[in-house]
Image: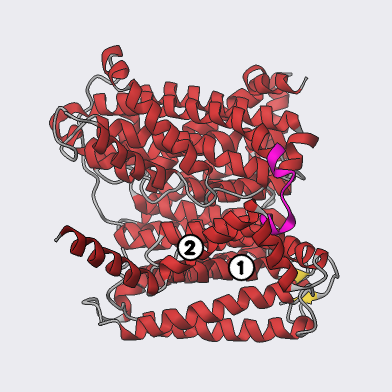
Amino acid sequence: MDFTHFFMTWIDLRLLALVGAGTFAGIYIGAIPGLSVTMAVSILISFTFGWEMYDALALMIGIYMGGVYGGSRTAILLNIPGAPSAIATALDGYPLAKKGLAGEAIGLSTTMSALGGLIGIAVLGFAAPAVSEFAIRFQPRDYMLLAILGILLVGSLSGESLIKGVFAGALGLTIGCVGLDPLTAQERFTFGYIELWGGISFVAVMIGLFGVSEALMQLKHINTPALKQKITRVIPSWKSVLKFLPLSVQTSLIGVIIGALPGTGGDIAALMSYDHAKRVTKNPEVPFGQGARAGLVAPETANNAAVGGAFIPMLTLGIPGDSVTAIIIGAMFIHGLNPGPMLMIERPEMFWFILGALVLATVFMLIFGLTGIRIFVKVVELPRAMLFPLILLLSIIGAFAVNNALTDVYWMLGFGVLGYFMKLYGYQLGPVILGVILSRLIDDNWRRAIISEREDLGRLFHGIFTSPLSLVLFMAVVAIFFTSTPLWPMLKNKLRKAAAKKDA
Amino acid sequence: MHDPNRRLPGERIFSVLMVAVSLFLFYTATQISGLSGLAEPGSFPMFATGMMVITSTIITFKTLRLPHSDVHGWKSVFPGLVILTIILMGFYALALQPVGFLPTSFVFLTIANWVMARGNPLRAALTSALSLVLVYVVFRLVFSVLMPEGIVPEREILAYIGSILNGGVK
């Protein structure tokens, strides 16, 4: 009876409390600008290292769900999206707050986030078993292509240039290679140091890139004052919820699909849904951008629906949808789980457990979201001079706690400084962590694929071109590369000119 | 936010440095198993570092062609506060094992808080002490993370508090 694990977090008081605490913490972490869910989850991994797997997952799932939602609050109240997935929320949320409707905006966004979250989880529940059944038939080359596609998507969609994204991804892959080769035990990038045989701890890399570098970056704006808002009635009326129900179902579905694509997450889902709402809402009460409620509902449902979506490739293929799921995959590895199509066969109870925890986190999100807003405003106004030293301290403890070794602390510091400069000069950090996590998978599957074709590249390509799935994946990889070369704008220009000629 | 059409101070050096690092790593990758086959331990590292070399070179050429941004001087991109924080963290890591978690963290938090808030050192010490208590309770006692004790006989103190509490129950 694996299905009974769905209720595990609901019945077990300890797990219930952990999901609740995680969601609560996630809301605040997501809301405080400068603190991100990625940062929190990466620091927490090291502390939950010695825990039972169920406990650790319960806490992390809570933080993830709460964090995606939490960003909306500061977006509405301060016009500062607490997280990238709340960028679209600020567009109409802040104008609503300026009109004195902050309470209503928060209430509506909370309810709709919960609705979107539930729809996303429902899709996960139905789609994941089917996807993993399908994924069992994947060839090693398909895994390799899918993983490369994931890194490329994160690189191309999240930053200013794909080239910088590819560089970041390749850097991550290289970092992931450090240590003894898993197949032949040959040393790779160890430079003669035995300490490097086990590789660079990915937790140290993660905390450095997402904890330290982010905090260092924020030090530049340490003295920006916070704005104050008055909070009115929070619980939304049935009428307004019902009014936006059709739109929210549509945007939730957009959210799940975008979330499920490897490499794309809540931020892109939110922006695309906002765009969708703009197109389908014929007569908004006020124009979009000036406080239209539809413009608030759409991104909020979509980004929470994307959470359920992001778990689909993660659980069924072992390929993370974004940096947070990359970190959760890392955590699952640490606890001896192997996300991928076999997970559903070997450990089906884990799947139900995660599903149950996600639903519970959504319920907690709704409860915490509709209460305690006044205290919330006070916490967000906490002086950053108090906050940042604490984050840095936690980063150091976190890196140290993994192996009780100072080496990891130095790695973390190094990657923190590198991450600072990469961020400063417009390099994306998401692909680095995806690269580190996926390095082993790509390496293994590449070698399996090429060995099964007797090390003949021609045969490998023949295999790719004769399998529909491999072909689609391969074409997607090629298309992403093509759009970043100078050929793409040239082609677009040509097409535009041809169209203009036709019109004339 | 970084403006992709302008070059920040230090961006040129950083991109050239990335090319150098990539070349070095690529060279190291070629030494793993040579160019003997496609499924060797070194083939994937060569692919990854090769990508690094190609992309970093393109980035460098693009960066060199960009006009300079309005931001001048390395201080604008690497302010004193950031440098100080990194140095402070380095010292923290060095002192952590010999001196121990509690005193090192207290000094670290106090200095960082004092410098960042530009306020009263006494107030910084007080807030740091409070945050340290919170961190200690959450991470040492709830998450049971073991941190180096150093000069503070932590275990004895905890045992002593425990015995008082137990004695009180009796």
Disc 1 on helix, strand or loop?
A: helix
**In the foreground, A396 or B61:** B61
Secondary structure under badge 2? helix
Examine the structure image and report whether residue A458 is included in the region drawn in magenta. Answer: no
Chain bearing mark 1: A
Determine the residue located farthest toward the right in the rendered image: A184
Q: Which residues are magenta?
A: A133-142
- From the viewer's perspective, is A460 left or right of A32? right
- The quadrant holding residue A371 is top left
Quadrant the N terminus of chain A occupies: top right
Circle 1 is placed at which residue position?
Answer: A411
Instruction: Estimate the x, y position of residue B30 in percent, counting from the top left.
Output: 71, 84
Residue A420 shows in this picture: no
Rounded to the nearest angstrom, the CA distance separating label 2 from label 1 is: 36 Å
Residue occupying the point 56% across, 29% down: A358
Instruction: Indicate whether residue A141 is drawn in magenta.
Output: yes
Model colouring? secondary structure
Relative image position of residue A228 (x, y in whole percent): 21, 38
**The quarter of the displayed image where residue A482 is located:** bottom left
Q: Nearer the viewer, mark 2 or mark 1?
A: 2
Above/below status of B59 relative to A81: below
- In this view, the residue in front, A341 or A473, is A473
Residue to which mark 2 is pinned: A479
Disc sitting over residue A110 in the figure: none
Q: Earlier in the sequence, mark 2 or mark 1?
A: 1
- Secondary structure mainly formed by the magenta segment: helix
The reply to whether residue A7 is in sight is yes
Q: Is residue A339 above or below residue B162?
A: below
Badge 2 sits on which subunit?
A
Q: Residue at x 28, y 33 (%)?
A: A296
Instruction: Name the residue type under label 1.
Output: Trp
